[in-house]
Image (cartoon, rainbow, N blue to C red):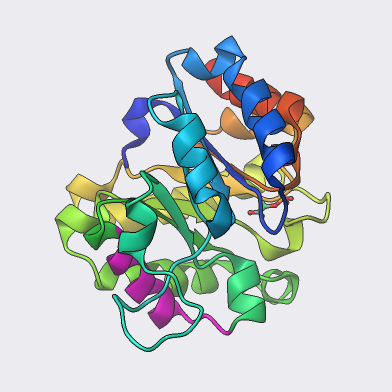
Amino acid sequence: MSRKAGKLVVGNWKLHGSLAGNEALLGDLLASPVLSAPGVTAAVCVPFPYLAQCQARLSGQVLGFGAQDVSAHVNGAFTGEVAAQMIAEFGAKFVIVGHSERRAYHGETDASVAAKTLRVLDAGMTPIVCIGETLAEREAGETTAVVTRQLETVLAALTLEQAAKIVVAYEPVWAIGTGKTATSAQAQEVHAHLRSLLRAKGEAVVDVAVLYGGSVKPDNAAELFSMADVDGGLIGGAALKAADFLAICEAGLSR
Ligand code: PEP
């Protein structure tokens, strides 16, 4: 998905929500004029059981929605898995793949993330491919090597046309849910490197949106979004409060 459309702000609800709570949160988000302003696109990625609620509540609205994971398989004997085509049937536009919590707790590898990315594209949705280094990797000076390996494994599995349709989210693992944010300079340095990898894949891919994620809050969003290669944010904790999520979207408007 191209960065030329403006900033993209995506909420990752993780393992949070209830039918009543979601109804209130989505209602508050839709009531705001911020989401209709040109220059920012917003979406929420919800637990699978809430896709039907999002379909009912968000069809035809300015707020998009999606899922947080997908099966690497199309169908078959894979108990508990959810296929991309099933998610697409609900009108979802986005699927997060390779979130660091999936990599850490569910054994996801660069190869499985690449397979999931393909399933999402085949189903006509936009994969938000998450990459990022751990604290130990950053301290060992391995940040560039890690994010290069993670992104290049996915890019190698895609045609140019497919690669132009993805979104990348740089999420340093040490900044997720910790309240520690990468400085805007740290984020820009990695994003500029990711942009060079996208350019190396082909000119058609250079404008793929690269989001930053990791403790983005209303008070640091504007600074992060002002960086040349930061095209929006993937928002965890702050996406659960309408006022905070909207303030982050608003910070994207003027950048
Ligand atoms: C995330 O879950 O992708 C995330 C960035 O979380 P948080 O904003 O809470 O750090």
* Quarter of the figure with residue 112: bottom left
- x then y, percent, for residue 246: 66, 24
Q: Residue at x 67, y 75 (%)?
A: 137
Dominant secondary-structure state across the stretch colored magenta: helix
Q: Residue at x 56, y 44 (%)?
A: 188
Q: Is 95 in front, or is 251?
A: 95
Q: Quadrant of the N terminus?
A: top left
Total labels: the figure holds 0
- x then y, percent, for residue 15: 70, 59
Q: Is residue 8 magenta?
A: no
On screen, residue 145 versus residue 20, left or right, reads: left
Which residue in the rendered view is the most extreme toward the right?
179
Q: Is 6 in front, or is 112?
A: 112
Q: Is 184 in front, or is 106?
A: 106
- x then y, percent, for residue 202: 19, 54
- x then y, percent, for residue 126: 35, 50
Q: Residue at x 69, y 48 (%)?
A: 236
| Residue 35 vertical placement versus 158 (above, below) | above
On screen, residue 244 versus residue 226, left or right, reads: right
| Residue 133 vertical placement versus 247 (above, below) | below
Q: Is residue 116 magenta?
A: yes
Inspect this view and state whether residue 50 appears: yes
Inspect this view and state whether residue 255 appears: no
Magenta stretch bounds: 107-120
| Residue 37 vertical placement versus 182 (above, below) | above
